[in-house]
Amino acid sequence: MSEVKMEDIVSLAKRRGFIFPGSDVYGGLSGTWDYGPLGLALKRNIMNLWWKTFVENRDDMYGVDAAILMNQKVWQASGHVDTFTDPLVECSNCKSRYRADHLEGDKCPNCGKTGTFGEPRMFNMMFKTNVGPVDDENSVSYLRPETAQGIFTNYRNVVDVFYPDVPFGIAQMGKAFRNEISPRDFVFRSREFEQMEIEYFVHPDKWEEAFKQWQDNIKGFLKQLGLEKVYEVEVPAEDRAHYSKRTIDYEYDFPHRRDELLGLAYRTDFDLMNIQKASGKSMEYRPKDGGTPFVPHVIEPSFGVERAIMAVLTSAYTEDEVNGEKRTYLKLPTHLAPVKVAVSPLLKNKPELVEKAREVYKMLKKEFGNVMFDDNGNIGKRYRRQDEIGTPYCVVIDFQTLDDNTVTVRNRDTTKQERVKTDVLISKLL
Ligand code: ATP
């Protein structure tokens, strides 16, 4: 478990405009969260980094963006209608409901009574809806509980249009929905969240090699997120999803406990074979060299965006003391920080300083994009605020700037300041 407290992360996230409870003004909606400007910037930075690393920078990856609503046959064939369930128990005393495998002992966490839980019943986590004006069995659809099936259903399209060599991957990021029995631990277990998933299609004889490569790829990506200590946990056969022949859970020390950050699974040909059976369409891949056709097997690295955000915030959250005062700051990697540089005039009531600060701000904004003009409160308050949102650099324009064209650059982590000529400022901040 991390030493960082959950309430500190939640409170900073709300106070500073990262993440707010969903529908807060109406008392909230359990398991939903809204991203404010800074949280959205952090989330986009993580998602863009993933896309760049695994799609743009590679030659063997194809991106898709499938519809969230899909034909109900998708979820029948995939097994989700029958088996995407969690064990639900209800306390006979206070009627509160829990996921049976998340309870410790038989004491109700709400009313404290023991022995009040009956036998668990299996609860399907998919959100059911109807597509179109007729409310019958044929119009039933579901909000997708994973992005993976939108990839599998486009496998044939990608193969037919792009004719990639095997191995190749299809990647998708986007929303997923699960009617979690008890959403909790901030955004860690939400009912609406985002996934970043890849199905990597390999020859059946080559899955072990590809699995190993994905372990390395994941390690590299986690490093880019600034997450050094992530535990690879081999999931024993009895705990694996029915389709998986090998799964590794990547666990992180979150504030609530050590828990799953992402998963890597060998899904065999389970999904493509199910689609082939249910749709009657061939999922075979025909090698260009005339070799024997085969249905590819699949390696699936599955990242949850919210869990990545929580891990990044937990790892970045730091408290120290500066000049005898307690300071809280987010030690975010620069490429993830919502704001890269904040620009301030030392005093906001001196027009000549404000004008010069605006000029420097414009120059940096053009170069970096995520630059903030900050003239709220005194300079100490500005530093504290920028530290809390993880801004790596604060640039301050003072009277000396007007004389010699130098500005102060303050470093978030060391709090050290140095004077830098404005004509080399961009290269200094790169
Ligand atoms: P758990 O056991 O924690 O419920 P899972 O094993 O069911 O998770 P997967 O089905 O493997 O999760 O989903 C892939 C990834 O999607 C997870 O590793 C996680 O990062 C993310 N994820 C799954 N459920 C949620 C959720 N309710 N809220 C936020 N992220 C989630």
Image (tube, helix red, strand yellow):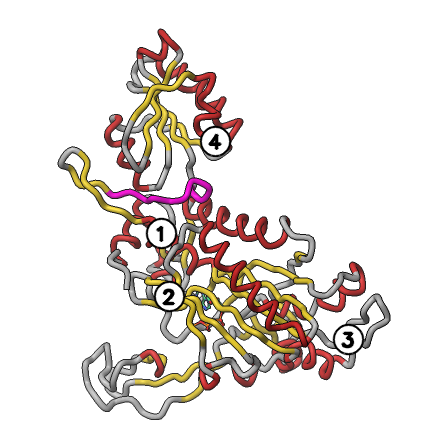
309 part of magenta stretch: no
Disc number for residue 264 = none
In this rendered view, identify the residue nearer to me: 279 or 51.
Answer: 51
- Say which residue label 3 marks: 284
Mark 2: which amino acid? Answer: Ser
Q: Is mark 3 within 8 Å of ligand 1?
A: no
Give the answer, above or below, for where 55 lies relative to 135: above
Residue to which mark 2 is pinned: 30
Mark 1 or mark 2, which is nearer to you? Answer: 1
State which tag comes first along the sequence, 1 or 3.
3
Write the start and end of the magenta stretch as one range.
328-337
Mark 3 or mark 2, whichever is nearer to me: 3
Instruction: Determine which residue is flagged by label 4.
Output: 430
Which numbered disc, 1 or 3, marks the residue closer to the eye?
3
- To which residue does mark 1 refer? 313
First in sequence, mark 4 or 3: give its number: 3
